[in-house]
Amino acid sequence: MDFDLSEEQRLLKESVDGLLKNSYDFDQRKKYGAEKGGWSKAVWGKLAEQGLLGLPFSEEDGGFGAGAVETMIVMEALGRALVLEPYLATVVLGGGFLRRGGSAAQKAAHIPGIIDGSKTLAFAQLEKNSRYDLGDVSTTAKKKGDGWVIDGEKFVVLNGEAADTLVVTARTKGAQTDRNGIGVFLVPRDAKGVSVKGYPTQDGMHAADITFTGVEVGADAAIGDPENGLPLIEQVVDDARIAMCAEAVGAMDESLKLTVEYLKTRKQFGVPIGSFQTLQHRASDMFVMLEQARSMAMLATMAGDFDNAKERATSVAAAKVQVGKSSKFVGQQSIQLHGGIGMTMEASIGHYFKRLSIIENTFGDTDYHLQRVADGSGLI
Amino acid sequence: MDLSLTPEEQAFRDEVRAFFRDNVPASIKKKLQENRHTTKQDMVDWTRILHKKGWAVTHWPKEWGGTGWTPVQQYIFNEELQATPAPPPLPFGVNMVGPVIYTFANEAQKKHYLPRIANLEDWWCQGFSEPGSGSDLASLKTKAERKGDKYIVNGQKTWTTLAQHADWIFCLVRTDPAAKKQQGISFLLIDMKSKGITVRPIVTIDGGREVNEVFFDDVEVPAENLVGEENKGWDYAKFLLGNERTNIARVGASKERIRRIRELAASVQSGGKPVLEDPKFREKLAAVEVELKALELTQMRVVANEGKHGKGKPDPASSILKIKGSEIQQTTTELLMDVIGPFAAPYDVHGDDDSNETMDWTAQIAPAYFNYRKVSIYGGSNEIQRNIIAKAVLGL
């Protein structure tokens, strides 16, 4: 039982925190968000330079072979600075499919570009009516010769506009909600028949709705078994949930810090408002919720590599429940304790609240995951 | 980072688990499962079993019977004990006055009192709270005047848990009325058989008799019963209250309770199917399981931190353990109310002691729900814990 970081992990944390401290304050973030695609190529280059984009990939594939804890460290730091760059979409999701399910040729074709920062990815999964069910897929991939033809519509694809390559879930057989018959395909974003409509999201990131019309890809586009891709999808999406739990912890940590700072400096009735017990207790409750979320984010981080998929899924679902509840409480109370200033676009605190809110509704909200825990045979 | 137990720790857990499985008397275990009160004799019997094994005062220094276990081992021991369930060693002696004695008392006092605590020859109770001094403990008024080689004690203590069984009471008393609040308080050990002590029960809303008022009317206490220095009692009290907070999460006990809720909810019918299959109930149960899992991890973080950086001041983050631990315990009592529904109502006039042989398993569910409102009040109320976090952690 050991919760401390190793020496290397501590150095990693220092380096990513240091980088973001110097290059990612609130004003800089605003500038990055206004760049094409909604994030900064220069910042992405710096992340690549520091080796952060190669962390989870094996040394054989040119990466560092780092584990889940390293991803947790990075995601927490990204959450603390509200980073817009597509780390989740590219390294965790896109990279996750390649790392966990890709063939040697697929890895060789894509991973070096991820690591050196020249290529980004996006995961096209959500459909009009699929909501949080990963097995609900109506986009089709039909066999044509050796390759596949993809038709369908995907929504809110994070980094969908800027990505070079899309990782697309599509049905190769069966009915819309069958667990079998789902494949995962690599599709160049500029392939013929791919139409991308990009837009900013509520939390300042960028996403896209993407239509696939008769998009032809080769046999080598399929990652893993094209007729039984759901277990891989579930695992990689769990990776993303785990990463987002850490990101949320970073965002909550910073929210509480900003809020406590505000309570100490804002004066009313001639005293700092932090001297009022009502506000002190609210801040204490925020701390409790944050630490409970941090504990569960750690549990989820460890669960990511469980061999037993059911155990992994239940632990991750439980983490998402706690982090969702904590995010809502910390996010809302941060605004409340800031008062009017918390309502303004100029203050950073509201942007933390917005990111936390969107994280909660990504890959299953609190109710969805609570249901998953309830359906299981118990966590205790 | 590694959240799992080492193979040695796992082996230790298995050993402890097996010991509790084989040695907790069945009647005591059943009482705890059904939330009935254990008797004084139950506690004496159980303490002697633990003592024989060398596990009655596990966290004490080795020379006084401790085990020398690591914080992680202590944690495992407590978890397994609660999850069995087995009664925890009587806290007033083992966790409260014992550590004060071996840390601050003189050799003669250590030699006399500590072995008697370990074997439960002396049943201790705690004389801190007074009618006018609850959360604001330092405002206490019970006074001890020095006359020759004696103190004369006058005043009243309250909320004194199980004083009806007690042989001794450790008291905070005011020895210097002129000094500022926290100064002028001393830590005094008083024989409950002394002339002038009256114990009066306080019946709580569950009908139980756990707590008492204790009155002191010109009680003569030998001056040698003073612990440490006169007027330094507040320091010893703070030390004691810091120790009290470490075991307060009661994660193991809540785990046992949740397993029991599952079991009972599977056996009680609602609308032609077990309550456990009711989606609303399942969600509520899942929600508390998530909270408990999070608390377990938080507790492990506090324990691991203590193991790494040594036992110092109690981690202010341990206030989280008190707040969430008490809330979860309370929620489990609510879930049991949900399980039995209308059968929460019948009141068993025969009480819950050994003479009541036909007691139904449902009888103590409502009383436990009522009784557990105490857990967010005692040991520093949850509001006091929030004050601690605000000041010590957030710097407000």
Image: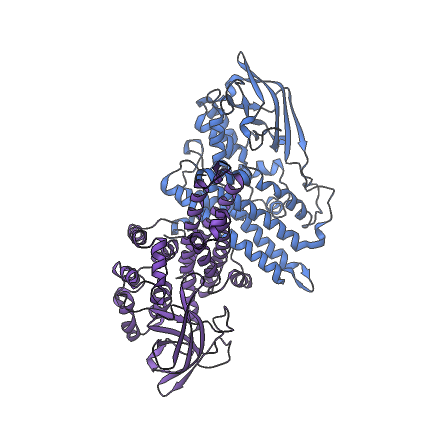
Chain colours: A purple, B blue
Q: How many marks?
A: 0
- Residue nearest the observer in this picture, B138 or B365: B138
Q: At which x and y percent is residue A317? A: 48, 61
In the image: residue B213, left or right of residue A287: right
- Tell me if residue B19 can be seen: no
Residue B141, compared with residue B381, is above or below; it is: above
Q: Looking at this rendering, what residue extends furthest in the bottom direction?
A: A145
Q: Is residue A32 above or below residue B223?
A: below
Res B46 quadrant in image = top right
Query: Where does the image place residue A35, in percent across and percent down from the top left?
Result: 33, 64
Q: Is there any visible trace of residue A233 in the rendered image?
A: yes
B82 or A108: nearer the eye?
A108
The residue lying furthest to the top in this view is B148
- Taking B86 as reference, is B93 above or below it? above
Residue A370 location (% of width, % of height): 53, 60
- When asked about the image quadrant of residue B191, the answer is top right
Q: Is residue B335 above or below residue A200?
A: above
Identify the residue at image location x=41%, y=34%. Answer: B62
Residue drawn at point x = 57 percent, y = 54 percent: B259
Q: Position of residue A358 (x, y in %)?
A: 46, 61
The answer to whether B287 appears left or right of A9 in the picture is: right
Residue at 36 percent across and 52 percent down: it is B1
Quadrant hosting residue B190:
top right
